[in-house]
Amino acid sequence: MHVVLREVRDGDLPLLFAFMSDPAATRMAAFTSAEPANRAMFDAHWQRIRASDTVVIRTVLADGVVVGTAGVYGPPAEREVTYWIDRAHWGRGLATAALRALLESVPERPLLARAAADNAGSVRVLQKCGFTVTGRDRGYAEARGEETDELLFRLDARP
Ligand SMILES: CC(C)(COP(=O)(O)OP(=O)(O)OC[C@H]1O[C@@H](n2cnc3c(N)ncnc32)[C@H](O)[C@@H]1OP(=O)(O)O)[C@@H](O)C(=O)NCCC(=O)NCCS
């Protein structure tokens, strides 16, 4: 599949909302917004991040089809990557390809990442893209309603 990133368009939002409110996906991601199925909160959040000068947020296309998002956000010393793929397309290498494309288009380093410790797919995606584990954390995961272990990752500039 041919994976590319492009600017988010208004017409993507209904699809992105469907991907990001899917209970199986939010449970996997764990550290979501307080109400992932709340469309008004989603719209307000996306309006804010699309208008932000410091947030890089892209729609992921696979063979021209909208399949997810990838982005970078956070203050200068703690820039962090994020990505989300529609459950219908999991396990086909799309998150790995999307994160690689993001890393090529965003030169800033280091980049940080977090994943629920049991989110094996996300942990694997980060490792395939060169991120290494730097530590662990534990916090309240909204999508699970419980304290959850998290792994912290970092990608440095290539030597
Ligand atoms: C996590 C997520 C991005 C993965 O997307 P994807 O397109 O399926 O990922 P890829 O196919 O590129 O890679 C997944 C890798 O994890 C592996 N994997 C997936 N589930 C696994 C499991 N339960 N145990 C072990 N490995 C697993 C796959 O085998 C693959 O590795 P491989 O290429 O070495 O075989 C996707 O499931 C998703 O969007 N989930 C909901 C949102 C989320 O969790 N975002 C990340 C928040 S940190």
Image: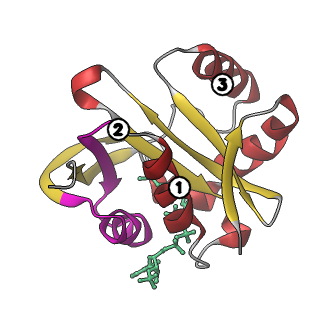
Residue 13 image offset from top left, x and y in percent: 79, 36
- Image height of 55 relative to 7, above or below: above
User: 158 or 25: nearer the eye?
Assistant: 158
Mark nearer the viewer, 3 or 1 = 1
Which residues lie in the magenta part? Answer: 108-132
The residue sitting at 17% across, 59% down in the picture is 133
- Image height of 125 relative to 138, above or below: below
Q: CA distance from mark 3 to mark 2?
A: 17 Å
Q: Amino acid at mark 2?
A: Glu
Quadrant holding the N terminus: bottom right
Residue 94 image offset from top left, x and y in percent: 60, 68
Mark sitting on residue 80: 2
Per the image, the residue denoted by label 3 is 46
Q: Is residue 103 visible?
A: yes
Per the image, the residue denoted by label 1 is 101
| Label 2 Cα crowd, 10 Å radius (few <14 / some 14-19 / many 20+) | many
Mark nearer the viewer, 3 or 2 = 2
Q: CA distance from mark 1 to mark 2?
A: 15 Å
Residue 76 image offset from top left, x and y in percent: 28, 21
- Image height of 53 relative to 26, above or below: above
Q: Verify whether residue 127 appears in magenta.
A: yes
Q: Verify whether residue 20 appears in magenta.
A: no
Q: CA distance from mark 3 to mark 1?
A: 21 Å
Dot 3 or dot 2: first in sequence order is: 3
User: 138 or 89: nearer the eye?
Assistant: 89
Q: Is residue 21 visible?
A: no
User: 129 or 21: nearer the eye?
Assistant: 129
Q: Amino acid at mark 1?
A: Ala
Q: Secondary structure at mark 3?
A: helix
